[in-house]
Image (cartoon, helix red, strand yellow):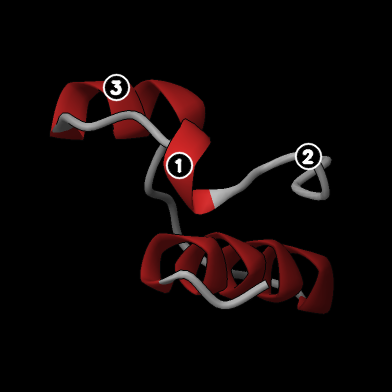
Amino acid sequence: MNTAALNFAALPKTYPGLVALYLPRPIHDKIAYDDAVKIVHTLVGIN
């Protein structure tokens, strides 16, 4: 997943919109973990 282009202002404002962007799923490896951390940082405004 390329999360480099994400920023807080561009995130969807609804849960269905966010799920369409990044579907919640189990984390099984380092790459999935890193992607999830990037999404969480974007959600809280850390870039």
Residue drawn where x is 39% and y is 21% of the image: 20
Quadrant placement of the N terminus: top right
- Name which residue type carries label 2: Ala
Check disc 1 and report the residue beneath it.
9
Label 3 element class:
helix
The x, y position of residue 45, in whole percent, is 47, 70
Determine the CA span between mark 3 and mark 1.
Answer: 13 Å
Check disc 3 and report the residue beneath it.
17
* Mark 2 crowdedness (10 Å alpha carbons): few <14, some 14-19, many ≥20: few
- Name which residue type carries label 1: Ala
Decide if residue 1 is on the left or right side of residue 27.
Answer: right
- Name which residue type carries label 3: Gly
Q: Name the residue nearer the viewer: 16 or 23.
A: 16
Determine the CA span between mark 1 and mark 2.
Answer: 11 Å
Check disc 2 and report the residue beneath it.
5
Disc tally is 3
Determine the CA span between mark 3 and mark 2.
Answer: 17 Å
